[in-house]
Image (cartoon, helix red, strand yellow):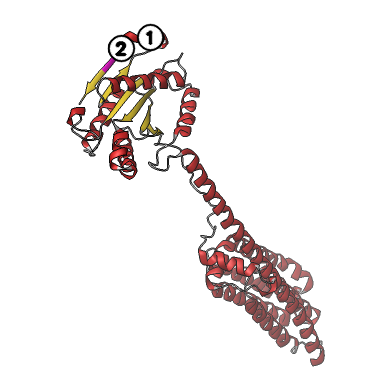
Amino acid sequence: MKSGASSLSPTPLDDTASVSMTPALEAETERLLSQRTRDIRFSPEMVRAYRKKDWPQRSKIARAWMVWVGLISMAFVPISFLLAPESLWLTLAIAGLLVPALHGCAYLVWRKPRSAAVEALSLMLLMNSVMIAYGILAVAAGGSNYERFLICIMYVNTIAIVVFNVGHAWSLCLMVCSTGMFFGFEIFNPAIDLKEAIGTSVFFAMGIYAAAVARKTQSILGQKAFLLSLRNQYRSEALERANHQLEILATRDPLTGLGNRRSATDLIENLWRDLTIPKASIAFIMADIDWFKRLNDTAGHAAGDECIRRVARTIEQSVRVGEDTVFRYGGEEFLIVLVHASPDLAWTIAERIRHEVEALAIVNPGTDRADDNAGVVTISLGVAFAHEAATPDTVAKWADDALYDAKRCGRNTVFLSNAHAEEDGARHAEPGAESENSAANSLRTTA
């Protein structure tokens, strides 16, 4: 248990590819979302953020493409036996070995993030190499297979432009290269003339250009979706921070940073519900700064606040880390909740607190040596243990009674109460014997 209320640890909304928001990114996000979608243009910082977050999906799609096209190319070998049996060995070498090997090399490139240029160049080299390989296969097959093989690879290149998320300029470059190679092989096709080769090439160029435009539109829409997710992310983070601040305000004392009375109540209720913790091992220590009003009246509220802060830090440093919890209970009063404590341990901790506070030597100008405290700030403490039949309020009352006994007996004192329900009732039934009963049922130490 830590001193005071629990804190929240913000968690990212997305996975490891989540973007670390900066004020510049937030401002750019708002500016771009206020424009028309087709006018979205990312800054270099936004491009890096976008590519980082988009990488897992982009990589999976690209590698899946490499695998399936490589497998389809190998499946083309038995099909080519039916189409061009005389070119079987060449088909086996190109479609069965070379093309899958090229896709395997591209697969390795896409296994980890690369620059946009490297990704696009790998796609360019892959598709152009495959285009040349199948062009050679088309020339070797001849006849109707010549045109069939070329059209097949142009179709594959067109799909690749749509599938691969690369820049629009790179898509256009691939379009030009693919169309140029297609035209280069077409003019050597003895089955068609130059006009038909030009017309076919222009036809496929238009189709690839349409695919490139579709890819650009898809990219812009993806960028807008990314901007919307960024806006949602930083607004959610802002809301989470606001909620965290509200929780701090609701459960922590703003002056000392300790838990407040509400968080003390929550912790104690949890302890009473926890059946694994024996009630007899739970102790409350009520602590109150001696003559604090005199300090406030003579030195001022600023000095009083500084005194409370220093005493709070000292109490925190005097208890067990992870076991005991310290709260500011009100004004100059503190509550320390001990768990798994024995009477000797509770006494030792309370005495340590008393001694360390006195050792601070905080001057209290409102007191003098006549008050038996050498003119410095001291603290009085009352300790009480719980048991199964006692409610938290009852145990707190016992600790409070022990604290008042310490005050009445001269301050700068620790009282360990052995009270139970009957003794508590007897003490209040015989007011005249109150001090005597307290002395009989308590241990007392002074400086």
At 77% across and 78% down in the image, what residue appears? Answer: 207
Q: Are marks 2 and 1 in contact (CB under 8 Å)?
A: yes
Amino acid found under the numbered disc labelled 1: Glu
Please tell me which residue lies in front, 384 or 307: 307
Decide whether residue 108 is among the magenta residues.
no
- Residue at the spot x=28%, y=39% of the render? 298
Q: Check the image and report above or below for 435 versus 52.
A: above
Q: Amino acid at mark 2?
A: Asn
Where's the C terminus, which quadrant?
top left
User: Which residue in the structure is indicated by mark 2?
Assistant: 441
Q: Nearer the viewer, residue 145 or 365?
A: 365
Examine the rendered structure and indicate whether residue 397 appears above or below residue 259.
above
In the rendered structure, which disc, 2 or 1, sits on the residue that comes first in sequence?
Answer: 1
Residue 97 shown left or right of residue 442 in the figure: right
Query: Start and end of the magenta stretch?
Result: 439-443
User: What residue would you read off at disc 1?
Assistant: 423
Q: Which quarter shows the N terminus?
A: top left
Q: Is residue 354 visible?
A: yes
Q: Position of residue 296 (x, y in %)?
A: 32, 38
Rendered image quadrant of residue 82:
bottom right
Location of residue 400 in the rendering, given as x and y in whole percent from the top left corner: 37, 22
User: Residue 398: x, y in percent?
Assistant: 38, 18
Q: Is residue 440 magenta?
A: yes
The answer, for residue 324, to whether it is visible in the render is no
- Which residue ends up furthest to the front in the rendered image? 297
